[in-house]
Image (cartoon, rainbow, N blue to C red):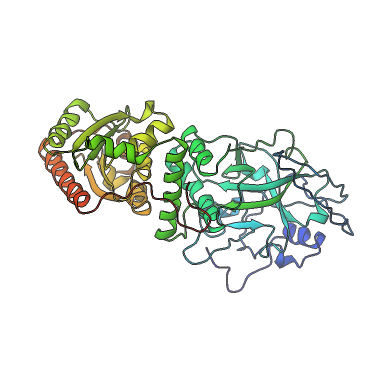
Amino acid sequence: SEAPPQQPQPPPNHLSLLAKTLHLPPLHLCHPLHPLPNPIPPNPPFFMVLHPPLPKPHIKHNPNLHHHHHRRQIPASRHVPPTKDLRYTQTAQQGHTWFMSSTYDTHEQGEVQFQHFPSKASKGRLLCVKGNDTHDGAWNSYALAWPETLPENATHMEGLTFVSYNHYNYDNIWHGLSAMVPFVAWHIKNECSKLPTRWVLYHWGELRTKMGPWLKTLMNATFNGYVDIERFDDRGGGDAAVCFEEAVVMRHNEGGMSRERRMEVYDLMRCKARLYCNVSMEESREDEGRGLNLVVIGMTMLMRTGARSFKNESAVIGIFERECHKVEGCRLLVAHSNNLTFCHQVKLMSLTDILVSPHGAQLTNMFLMDRNSSVMEFFPKGWLKLAGVGQYVYHWIASWSGMKHQGAWRDPSGDHCPYGEDDRRCMSIYKSGKIGYNETFFAEWARNVLHEVKMRKMEKESEKGIAATASGCACS
């Protein structure tokens, strides 16, 4: 994470005022802010602090309840920072980010970046939030408080709360999964000893109350229970605040994690997903060998409809089908990602050694294959020059999850752009383009990958059902 400046300046006055009301030196509210000229936009009064603090209450956890509330009355008011700090719009995803910008992450080399409340880093203070605005994060607020000095009429929420910041969204399975990976990493780091009672989801500081069904099911499987996404319907809105008994905040996705740590995360999610869906690898693989000691190679074409689909799907399928039939033990499966349930996708990927698919979110399923499986990716015209670094996300997830990305074919032909092919405006035309085919290239590519996979599987049986090996996190 970004280091504080060498000569930090005092934070804005509203933070100093809050620090004083909490009996803290102004610079110790969290960490110093980088001073910028733009003021924080006004937001409704939130924190109410009592002098002197009330005695610390004894809070008894009720495991049968998701929400258990304790209220305190505290009589004075101060402004506190918004969840989205507009001063950092140009560096929204960097360093301390524009989400909860006055705080910094705990980060050890190679580990996930996170914030934990209460903790030594927070000086024992709880995280409190106010607001359930879904359109402007500048109107939602946060602050830290000791249990003895919570906001007036605050709701104290027991249990562990996962607070997620996602710069993109929770519907797309790639962007959503990227935001969930650090929570799984923290879970493993803590020997899988704590399960979240609830999740609080933010996008640009705005509250989000749902995640895509694929992602939600994966989190259900990974954390052994129902994912309760907090809506703050009857609390945390208006002038009321919510304070969490324990909260873990993530805002950098996989940033800072070593490849080894990422692989542990994908191993655990793969194993938990197969367990959740009752997928038995032994039955899947050995039965298809028909007792003949065949090396079974699963080649799966995961197709798209609409944007970035193949122009002539049947012709492309025919090419790979012919090459598969030339290899003893190869079997080809063709599926469309838009009509598969989560467990259908888990089952399909468990049978797959080679995944053939256009660029798109459905490729996120690759981590559900056994380690060392292969991926073949396809792009429409124009992406290489104009799509930016995001076009390589499936190279990254292949590496992070222990797969082998076998390269990408990029269609040289496609829709005409009136601005010139190097003009950035062309990307709006190319982004959803369809993909053609090159029979000679596809056939040779398929032969080479099939040969490589067969040789590998003959030398050493494919790893099956790898589980995370972190202490306390074995998948069973």
Q: Residue at x 65, y 35 (%)?
A: 231
> How many discs mark residues in the rendered view?
0
Hey, which residue is sitting farthest bottom in the picture? 6
Q: Give the vertical position of 38 relative to 354 (above or below).
A: below
Residue 379's image quarter? top left
Residue 407 lies left or right of residue 79; in this view the side is: left
Which residue: 48% across, 58% down?
470
Residue lying farthest to the front in this orientation: 291
Q: Nearer the viewer, residue 293 or 159?
A: 293
In the foreground, 299 or 433 = 299
Residue 462 in the image, given as x and y percentages of width and height: 28, 49
Q: Is residue 103 left or right of residue 313?
A: right
Q: Nearer the viewer, residue 460 or 346?
A: 460
Q: Return the x and y of residue 422 as percentages of the image width and height.
A: 26, 45
Residue 421 seen by the camera: yes
Residue 350's x, y, as percent?
34, 39
Which residue appears at 24% of the width and 45% of the height?
Answer: 408
Q: Position of residue 264 (x, y in %)?
A: 43, 55
State whether residue 414 appears in this view.
no
- Above or below residue 93? Residue 379 is above
